[in-house]
Image: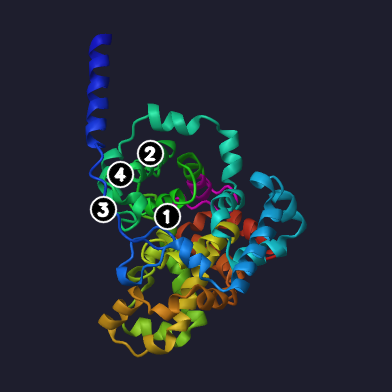
Amino acid sequence: MRGAEADSDAEKKQTYITEFEPGPVPPLKPVDKYGFLKSDQSTTVPAEVSSKCKPRNEREREEKRLRKWRKMIGVGGADWKHYARRKPSVVKRRIRKGIPDCLRGLVWQLISGSRDLLLMHQGVYEQLVLYETSSSELDIIRDISRTFPSHVFFQQRHGPGQRSLYNVLKAYSVYDRAVGYVQGMGFLAGLLLLYMSEEDAFWLLVALLKGAVHAPMEGLYLVGLPLVQQYLHQLDRLVKEQLPKLGTHFEEEMINPSMYASQWFITVFSYSFPFPLALRIWDVFLFEGVKIVFKVGLALLKYCHDDLVKLPFEKLVHALRNFPEDALCPDTLLPMAFSIKVSKRLEELTFEYEQMNNPSQESSTSLKTIRLRGLPKLC
């Protein structure tokens, strides 16, 4: 009997190895500073040359900024918690200006709480990857090539990048079988893997979905996408309240947020938005929570407001899925987003939505809301 089980295990392992036989290495092509393939080869400038070509004062400003960040977090993040407690407003301001790219992976782990999770669960990730099986494995394999296909790390079929992505997604699908695997999760894990190891990326995914620092986000991927439905309801109300002319136009053209905003929440802008903008949003998202997604969404609509209110249905849907390049500049869009106040209203809309869908929980939710209202709000 044991011999038969051993043969079965060997067959499964052989199938796994065959399934992940690496494909040919893609030919070398010019890439941008983040590792994405460039479309126009004629304008290619190597990253190291590009950095040297920056004006001297700009280089000096970046070096000074980097020194401030290194001092703030300490060696390996040792000083982070102490500094964040002493000077929260400084931390918030610096994160909103953008985390230095060379420190981004470490800082993301520190502000998300994932570093603490990893230290408390040594060896768990290896156990999930090597010794557990998932019913989602074939779905993950099928979808892997769709995640950042133009990035060099993920280009080779079943190469190092795709293997790492498979491992993280498979491990999470075992860790949280209620969620399992949903396609949009690949973009979250893929983005994280560009800045940290497999194990670090896994625990940051856990921190996000299970709520290590902010409210849990696993509802984005549960059956029926309940949290997506809630966020879309809240966004719809915010658009009508803060951009009433556009909200009325959306109603007249029968446009609802599910037609354009679902991916904003499911992938936190990592799916189809410019990578530099996605990174800046993620810096703030991991520190301040999901409200930045609402703020950025409202800022986009506000920036394009005068054009959007003139468009009929078909052109409106296209415009909402293809914002102009000038609207997606981080230094233009993000200050506008930061100026939009949503914290208190989101809390009220969450309470309202819960009452609509779970009226029996009125008393407990009401008590929770009363307690929350006594706390200071971040803008």
Q: Earlier in the sequence, mark 3 or mark 4?
A: 3
Mark 3 is on which residue type?
Answer: Pro
Report helix, strand or loop for mark 3.
Answer: loop
Q: Earlier in the sequence, mark 2 or mark 1?
A: 2
Q: Nearer the viewer, mark 3 or mark 4?
A: 3
Q: CA distance from mark 2 to mark 1?
A: 21 Å
Q: Which residue is at 31% across, 81% downward?
A: 316
Task: Give whichever of 361, 354 is nearer the camera.
Answer: 354
Mark 4 is on which residue type?
Answer: Ile
**Residue to which mark 1 is pinned:** 220
Q: Nearer the viewer, mark 2 or mark 1?
A: 2
**Residue to which mark 2 is pinned:** 167
Residue 27: which numbered mark, if any?
3
Q: Earlier in the sequence, mark 2 or mark 4?
A: 4
Would you say the residues marked 3 and 2 are in contact, meaning their CB atoms lie under 8 Å apart? no
Q: CA distance from mark 4 to mark 1?
A: 17 Å
Residue 119 position, x and y percent, is: 60, 36
Q: In the figure, residue 375 lies in which quadrant? A: bottom right
Would you say the residues marked 4 and 1 are in contact, meaning their CB atoms lie under 8 Å apart? no
Q: Earlier in the sequence, mark 3 or mark 1?
A: 3
Q: Nearer the viewer, mark 3 or mark 1?
A: 3
Q: CA distance from mark 3 to mark 4?
A: 25 Å
Residue 366: which numbered mark, if any?
none
Q: CA distance from mark 2 to mark 4?
A: 9 Å
Q: Which residues are magenta?
A: 204-220
Q: Earlier in the sequence, mark 4 or mark 1?
A: 4
Q: Is residue 352 visible?
A: no
Mark 1 is on which residue type?
Answer: Leu
Q: Which residue is at 45% across, 59% downward?
A: 357
Task: Give whichever of 318, 95 is nearer the camera.
Answer: 95
Q: Nearer the viewer, mark 4 or mark 1?
A: 4
**Residue to which mark 4 is pinned:** 140
